[in-house]
Image: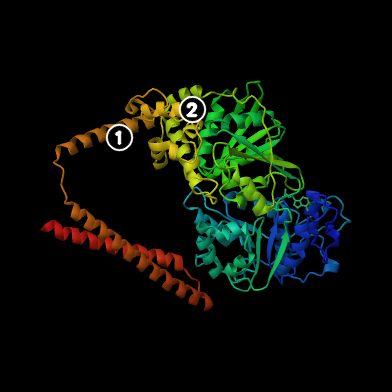
Amino acid sequence: MSNKESLSWNNLDYTLLPFIKRAIEAYDFEHLTPVQAMTIPMLSSNRKDVIVESYTGSGKTLSYVIPILERCVRDYSYETLKDTDLPHNGPRLKKPVNNSFHTMIIVPTRDLAVQVEKVVDFILSFYNDKSTVVPDDDEKEEETFYNAPKTLLLVGGDKKQNMNEDLHKYKTSKPHILIGTPGRVLEFLKKPIVNTKECAYLILDECDRLLLDPSFDKDIQQILFILPKQKRTGLFSATIKDPKFLVTKTAMRNPFKITVNALNKPKELTLKYVLTKTNNKLNQLLAILQKSEYKKCIVYMSSANEVTYFHKVINQFVRSIKDNQLFYKFPSGKELPIYSMSGKLTNQQREKSLELFKNDTISGKSVLLTTDLTSRGIDITDVDLVVHFDAPTTPEIFLHRSGRSARGGKAGNALLFLQEDTKELGYLDFLKIRYGIDLEEIYCNFDIDGYYDIKQLYKWVLKDRLRFDESVSGFVSFINGYRAHSLQSIFKANSINYLKLAELFGCIRFPKSPEVDAFLKDYQKLDCYFDDEQREHITAIKEKNGWFVEKFNMDDYPYSDKTREEKRLKELEENKKNKQSKSKKPAETVAWSNKVESKEKRQERKKKLVEKREIIVQEMKRKAIEDAENGVKSDYKDDIEEDWKAMVRSSKKQKKSDNDFFGDM
Ligand SMILES: Nc1ncnc2c1ncn2[C@@H]1O[C@H](COP(=O)(O)OP(=O)(O)OP(=O)(O)O)[C@@H](O)[C@H]1O
């Protein structure tokens, strides 16, 4: 990033440790980025907590990694390090005592944790200057090499026993810096062997996600209870809406706010949008992927189900195989590697996909289909195009996704797909008002019909029942994603044209869902425009009971995978038997008044349980705060869960004995 106004590394108001300088030289970074220039001195001084908001790709990672490495080495060095006389190689370090550690870095995803660990380890690889070894020259004094600080990655794995492995590594390698995801870090910190007393730094990268997302917040609150109060905290993100709230949540003692976000985005990032018909989105995407200029492109979809399904669809239509990789072959004959990465893959598969995409330099162009799992933090500098195939559920995610391109001062584009047959155009005004961001419209004059047609898609789906299942999952997940949108006035579920949506997914019949039922019952009531052709199409499909192809018996629709098919046939057989035996039993008739009564009872019981749970939560929270104030480790979330489970168990027992009692009568 050649930012002329920024500071040069030699002009910092203190001298960087030589190994950090060597790493920066290897990176070939001439200047500090603005966020680094402001944050590094502040955090290194060890006097301030910082809350840092700076646009995507602006170098926030190094702005906390450099200070924590500086502090760690200075704090653990046997000698006090004087800036005027720093040892060329890293100094001899003490190991953390009594199973303690120096720094905790927490990020929201495993992939990001792996990435941050790589950055830390890269810098630490310069701890000793190996080029100074002169083996054959006896006259020169040999350099003394010492061990650099160590890191430990704390992320959930595919294997259950991983925690024991982590603890073993922790005890034996004595790491100074721990990097992980909230759930795993909490589990780790709760182990009696882990001593948190010496923790001097806590970094929460993507802090708004960690502190505001309910799925992380509880874990983070417990982590904050467990870690000592006397530590420096650093909060980092490109989007911090309410800094005061985050400061209160983290109980920072001496906070300093740093903001480098005048445009809310890197100035090198160009934002555009394209209006597209829902059923033509995939063709439009393929046209853009073929005809646009880019090196690496990330395409964001709203769910893992969608990614899985569309990855298969894309690869199906004219593909070839090279070195075990699937390539999409365009009608023009040019090939393009398309990778996919979502939560449906195992950790290993995800890592592999990301690595292949990152390192793909042979094809000239490569594409990654993914979800918001990779919307934050992931740093692949060659990405110069981001496509929002489905609009993101919050405007913050829009900035994070778009910011996967135009990183480190390079130019990049982000293209938002808006469905012209919905109310999505309103999103543009919202982005303008909320973030002052203008998106320029692009008109794709590409011939977008040439990639595949719907009949081909149906034919392909009909060949394997798994494809039908996946088309339905994709369709349903899309609707769920739409319903979860934070901007409900713009992303209205009742403005979706379900007919076109079903066509996009190649659904051979309408999936069953309340939205589709309402659509088929009275589509005219929806907030959506239908032309004559579509009206006729809907009437025809209604007459066919929701089928897009000729109706057939679903029992005769096989999986091409043998084991799956055997299982299906077995289940089908069992279902038939169960139905027959049920139809023989006379139906029990229950008085309507009894049903109503039991429904009321159920509701009352539910209400009582909710009230009891709230009492337990409050009581445990109070206890946890008390414990924390007395310096005792608190396991209050676990306790609540335990108490809650015990209560549910006893309530079930009670219910069972009630039933038994009545059964006896
Ligand atoms: N001083 C610098 N000069 C040039 N490039 C830099 C400098 N510091 C970091 N970079 C590069 O800029 C890119 C983006 O850095 P980083 O991942 O830290 O951004 P970020 O601000 O954390 O972004 P995000 O908010 O998306 O997580 C990286 O490839 C990094 O190597």
Q: Which mark is residue 320?
A: none
Quarter of the figure that contains the C terminus? bottom left
Position of residue 469 measured from the top left corner of the image (x, y, whole percent): 42, 34
Residue designated by label 1: 571
Whether residue 309 sits left or right of residue 562 in the image: it is right
Position of residue 423 measured from the top left corner of the image (x, y, whole percent): 55, 42
Position of residue 249 measured from the top left corner of the image (x, y, whole percent): 57, 68
Whether residue 185 sits left or right of residue 83 in the image: it is left
Q: How is the image coloured?
A: rainbow
Residue 126 appears in which quarter of the rendering?
bottom right
Between residues 439 and 60, which one lies in front from this camera angle?
439
Residue designated by label 2: 532
Q: CA distance from mark 1 to mark 2?
A: 43 Å
Assess whether mark 2 and mark 1 are in contact (beta carbons under 8 angstroms). no
Q: Is mark 1 within 8 Å of ligand 1?
A: no
Q: Quick one: SS at disc 1? A: helix
Observer-side mark, 1 or 2, equals: 2
Whether residue 496 sits left or right of residue 179 in the image: it is left
- For the view shown, which residue lies furthest in the left direction? 665
Between residues 460 and 186, which one lies in front from this camera angle?
460
- For the view shown, which residue lies furthest in the right direction? 139
Q: Is residue 400 visible?
A: no
Point out the tag, 1 or 2, that comes first from the N-terminus: 2
Residue type indicated by callout 1: Glu
Q: Quick one: SS at disc 2? A: helix
